[in-house]
Amino acid sequence: MNDAPLHRLHQFLQLSSAEASAFAELAVERRRLRRHDTIRAQGDPALEVYFLVEGWVASCIDSAAGNRQIVKVHLPGDMMGTPSLALAQAAETLCALTRVTVDVIPTDKLGELFLTSPRLAGVMFLNAQQERIWLMDRLMSVGRTSAAQRLAAFLISLFERLRSIDDEASTRFQLPLSQGEVANVLGITPVHANRTFAQLERNGLISRTGRWLTLKDVDGLRDLASVPVREFQNLPPWLSRAPEKAPARKQPAKAQRELSA
Amino acid sequence: MNDAPLHRLHQFLQLSSAEASAFAELAVERRRLRRHDTIRAQGDPALEVYFLVEGWVASCIDSAAGNRQIVKVHLPGDMMGTPSLALAQAAETLCALTRVTVDVIPTDKLGELFLTSPRLAGVMFLNAQQERIWLMDRLMSVGRTSAAQRLAAFLISLFERLRSIDDEASTRFQLPLSQGEVANVLGITPVHANRTFAQLERNGLISRTGRWLTLKDVDGLRDLASVPVREFQNLPPWLSRAPEKAPARKQPAKAQRELSA
DNA sequence: CGGAAATTTGAAATCGCTCAATGATAGTGG
DNA sequence: CCACTATCATTGAGCGATTTCAAATTTCCG
């Protein structure tokens, strides 16, 4: 394993070099897929998790009636498929939204690391909790707000996450999801998604040219979305103890990242 | 700590007696609250998590605009407030739906246990993943299905969970949520929740008398809900090793999956 | 360049919402 | 134990956001 996205984990918790290399050696295989390819389908045996090196991936739940809901859009640096660790059969379908590169990690290697490296276990645990919060916020958004608010919330959360990967990330970026896919995320119809995009554009909150999107009024979007602001803790007190036997390095208090809002 | 609900954890993973008692000693205080009391509000410092001994609790997200969405209904045996471990300030409000008894666990004690007891850490990790799956299923339900389907899904999931606490649990039980609260869970209006209850009753799926509810056609409700069936693994292979210093058993190498759909 | 997929727009139908009023229930204090 | 009151459940009527169906462009990809 190489690459930038790994720095997300470092950022989340300063890993000791031993820990970092332990994590880096988990992957047994690197796969490349095209847009619309399925990385792993709901119902498949859950023997692997995935580290997203490059590209965007949708995590979907299929209802028994055959409806598909995108429950999470993964960006580079995300761990994917971990919820299914609690099941024998995968809970979600992982579907490439763009050309992607993923590292494949067998669950038993992950489990072994989990049991032998307490601090890494802590990081993975906290990551799962963070994902729960994102899901809860999405649920609030879908359950209690209008289509325009949901779209604003989605765009803002993407922007925040892009910025957490790359500090330079601009308010202008390419959205690799079709309007139909965005609609699916928001729990509305493609047609209505189109009208909602047009509405935000009319109101001067965004502008669009093809796949390119500009958030013209980030604060306005944030207000509209009205999702709570979250200040995730990279290093909660109970994890800040030294890894292994190395003396505890005091971390400079990092500026917290916030999410949505 | 005493009581039945703890057996849920035992059930989830056969704990060694040392582990069980370690867990039992986490709680520093037992609190009793009345219906509508707030156990811990969104924004409060996140220094505690809670073990629900008795009663029902709602976990809510408040939007910046002041709307409140119930994102989870907790039953006895549930751990509550853990998502906020990733934040300095609580992400969710915990609100008593009935008279409740909770055990209070300081986060640093929990963290210590997490770092010293790998198998317990594994249990907590898997529990978080399981919660993610429930949230994803709820999101699918709210995003892609009608009010009647959502209500069916909610009732079925309550029933399943009640049964997982008590094998004898009947299809007839008392629902301590008002219709307004149910409506909130489903992301609809109280008025419409009422009409939806009436609709399910007309169709012979449920019957009601006061707060008492009978699921008259569980399979019918399940079909209607069309939420995927989940088989949670109490003891995934990578956690099935003996606790403490027992040697790691080699798992049989399993067939690799291929991808690309 | 050609065909398929995605976007855009219109019009009509629906589901769920809002407002409003009435009846039932339960918790509280006398 | 009862009366009182607030909360909850129920029902009606009209409205509005979103859906559905359908067709015309436009964009993307091979």
Image (cartoon, coloured by chain):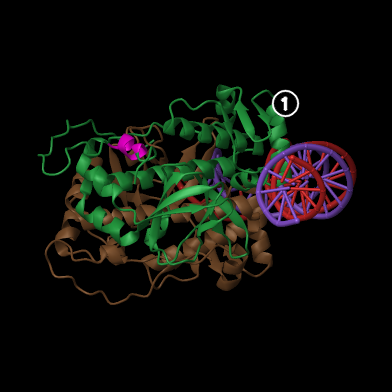
Chain colours: A brown, B green, C purple, D red
- At label 1, counting other C-alpha atoms closer than 10 Å, the crowd grade (few under 14, some 14-19, many 20 or more) is few
Taking the image as shown, residue B225 lies to the left or right of residue B189, namely left
Parent chain of label 1 = B
Please tell me which residue lies in front, A169 or A98. A169
Magenta-drawn stretch contains A76: no
Q: Nearer the viewer, residue B258 or B46?
A: B46
Q: Is residue B157 left or right of residue B29?
A: right
Q: List x then y, in percent, for residue A171.
A: 50, 70
What span is colored magenta in the figure?
B7-13
Residue at the location (55% across, 62% down)? A227
Whether residue B47 is visible to the viewer of this picture, yes or no, is yes
Q: Residue at image x 18%, y 66%?
A: A242
Which of the 4 quarters of the picture holds residue B207?
Answer: top right
| Residue A246 position by quadrant | bottom left
Q: Main secondary structure of the magenta part?
A: helix
Per the image, the residue denoted by label 1 is B202
Question: Element type at marker 1?
Answer: helix
Q: Quadrant of residue A107?
A: top left
Residue B184 or residue A19, whichever sits in front: B184
Q: Amino acid at mark 1?
A: Arg
Asked whether B114 or B221 is in front, the reply is B114
Q: Can residue B8 be found in the magenta stretch?
A: yes
The x and y percentages for residue A237 are 30, 67
- In the shown orientation, is residue A12 left or right of residue B161? left
Q: Does residue A27 appear in the picture of this structure?
A: no
Q: Position of residue A69 (x, y in %)?
A: 52, 42
